[in-house]
Image: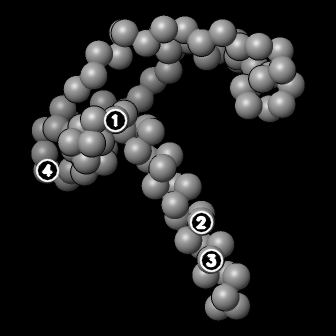
Amino acid sequence: MRDVTAYRPVTIRPSMRMSGRVRPPRQNDSPHQVSHQASGGSREGAPADTPGIAGELAEKMGMHKTTLLEHIHKAEKRLIGHILAQGA
C-alpha cells in the first residue's frame, strides 16, 4: 500500500476555484473531525478491521478505496446513460 503521508499539498489557483474544479474548504472539513464507522466496508461476520471487497480490490490495484469507488460510480453513470440513449 502506498504511503499516504508522502502526498504534497496542491496549490489551488484562483482560476481552478472559479471554474468549479475545486470546492472552497468548509469550516468543519478537518480530517480529525470527520467520523467514519469503525466497521467501514467490512464483510458481515468478519472482524471490523478486515477490508471489504472494495478495499481489497483497491489494495490489489494499488489505489485508494475512495478513488476506486469514484471510478466505479463514473462507469455506472456512463452505463446508465448508454442504456437510456437506446430507448430502454
- Circle 3 SS class: helix
Q: Position of residue 56 (x, y in %)?
A: 22, 44
- Circle 1 SS class: loop
Q: Earlier in the sequence, mark 2 or mark 4?
A: 4
Reply above or below: 66 against 18.
below
The answer to which of 31 and 2 lies nearer the viewer is 2
Residue 87 shows in the view: yes
Circle 1 residue? 63
Alpha carbons under labels 3 and 1: distance apart = 27 Å
- Circle 2 SS class: helix
Q: Position of residue 3 (x, y in %)?
A: 29, 16
Q: Nearer the viewer, mark 2 or mark 4?
A: 2
Reply above or below: 14 against 69.
above
Mark 2 in CB contact with mark 4 (< 8 angstroms): no
Q: Is residue 58 left or right of residue 50?
A: right
Please tell me which residue is depicted at 27% across the width and 42% down the height of the picture: 61
Circle 3 residue? 82
Mark 2 in CB contact with mark 3 (< 8 angstroms): yes
- Circle 4 SS class: loop
- Please name the amino acid that badge 4 sits on: Gly
Q: Earlier in the sequence, mark 4 or mark 1?
A: 4
- Quarter of the figure with the N terminus: top left
Alpha carbons under labels 2 and 4: distance apart = 34 Å
Alpha carbons under labels 4 and 3: distance apart = 37 Å
Alpha carbons under labels 2 and 1: distance apart = 21 Å
Q: Nearer the viewer, mark 4 or mark 3?
A: 3
Residue 55 shows in the view: no
Alpha carbons under labels 2 and 3: distance apart = 6 Å
- Please name the amino acid that badge 1 sits on: Met
